[in-house]
Amino acid sequence: MLKRSLPLILLIAAAVPGGYAQDAWKGHQPTLTPQHSGTTQLLIAVSPVNSRVVWAAGTGGTYVVTTNGGATWRSGVVPGAESLQFRDVQGVSDRVAYLMSIGDNTGDFRIYKTEDAGAHWTIQFTNKTTNAFYDCFAFWSPDRGIAHSDSVNGVFPDIRTDNGTTWHSIAPRMPPALSGEASFSSSGTCITTQGSQNAWITTGGSSIARILATRDGGYTWNAYDTPLVSNPNAGGLSVAFRDPWHGIVGGGDLTNDSATQAATSSDGGQKWTLTTKPPISGAIFCLAYVRGVEPYDDWWHRDDAGHKHDRSVVITTETQPNFSSGAAAWTPDEGQTWYKLPDVSGYWGIAFANPEAGWFVGNNGQILKISF
């Protein structure tokens, strides 16, 4: 299995019709502003709450948080997690956040939560399933979320919380796994939620890269094939949906830098079409819609607004063998046309609060604010 064979730090591990004229975007590039995270640890995942409050996390049990849009960041290490990597983070407010860890041992896969801005962390879940590997989690609301693991003996041992405190198994509800089917914890975006009930998971590791989808909060699921390359080192790594029907998935092959791929769906993930090939090499570690989580301060309005950048997507890749020098690009039309972001390299995660406020995070504690 890929994640056991590579060093742990490296374990991520017919185009859609355009809505805008290409010339309208020609020469346009977003503003990029480096920020200081206060750590040199690899930052893997990032989660904006709004344009002011952003959480990120990574290796060495490290998290960082800003409450002023990144003008200053505060870094910290979760006690007892110094040897672990946080592969996903979910910010809820300036005081509340969740973290997901991985490590060498079965019990190192944990979910932590703080309710006092990181002063204290509570372990909500500790894995007990041998060979489980929890890659990512996502939330519909501050108290309702789902966490996804690689398959174990043909079963996905996924878990869900309905109260923001306790997690329970939904493994019997998941689709049967293909042989070797797994996901990639490259940025905590192998799962995405939308609205109050929808979720999609991207997989690989087997002969087919699939999307696992639910419309009822995880009670029932369907599995759909994608055209992404898939093998023990390849598949979908990152998925996002901008509404119940329109989404994008990205991935590649961790052993073949030329296999960069993305695909879009307009029917809720049932069918997928490859986009124009992105202009950068490496596996897509993360992709994000520029529209973000909307310029509101609470969870309940995140799907209300539609803007100029509804179909704009930013991707970031990493290249083998060190996964430390990938590039980034963006598209205004979900992959029909692409623009490389010059001099952007070494980032694992990307997420937006709104088009004016997005953040890359990556190697050596790098943080880069991106504004369209």
Image (tube, rainbow, N blue to C red):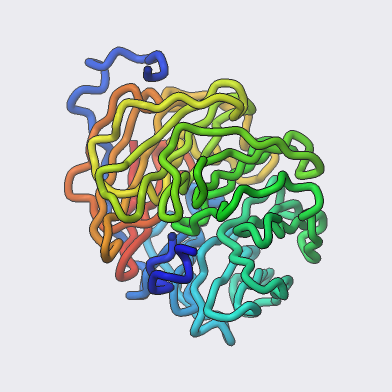
Viewer-side residue, 114 vs 259 = 259
* Left or right for 1, reference 283: right
At 74% from the left and 38% from the top, the residue drawn is 197
* Left or right for 125, reference 181: right
Task: Kindly tell me whether residue 121 is visible in this rendering.
Answer: yes
Viewer-side residue, 262 vs 316 = 262
Task: Kindly tell me whether residue 46 is visible in this rendering.
Answer: no
Q: Indicate the position of residue 260 as horizontal and vertical percent values.
A: 32, 41
Residue 112 quadrant: bottom right
131 shown above or below 32: below
189 shown above or below 36: above
301 shown above or below 172: above
At 71% from the left and 47% from the top, the residue drawn is 176
Q: Indicate the position of residue 66 as horizontal and vertical percent values.
A: 47, 62
Q: Indicate the position of residue 261 as horizontal and vertical percent values.
A: 36, 37
Residue 199 quadrant: top right
At 53% from the left and 77% from the top, the residue drawn is 103
At 29% from the left and 49% from the top, the residue drawn is 282
Counting every numbered tag in the picture gives: 0
Q: Indicate the position of residue 323 as horizontal and vertical percent values.
A: 30, 61
In the picture, the quarter occupied by the C terminus is: top left
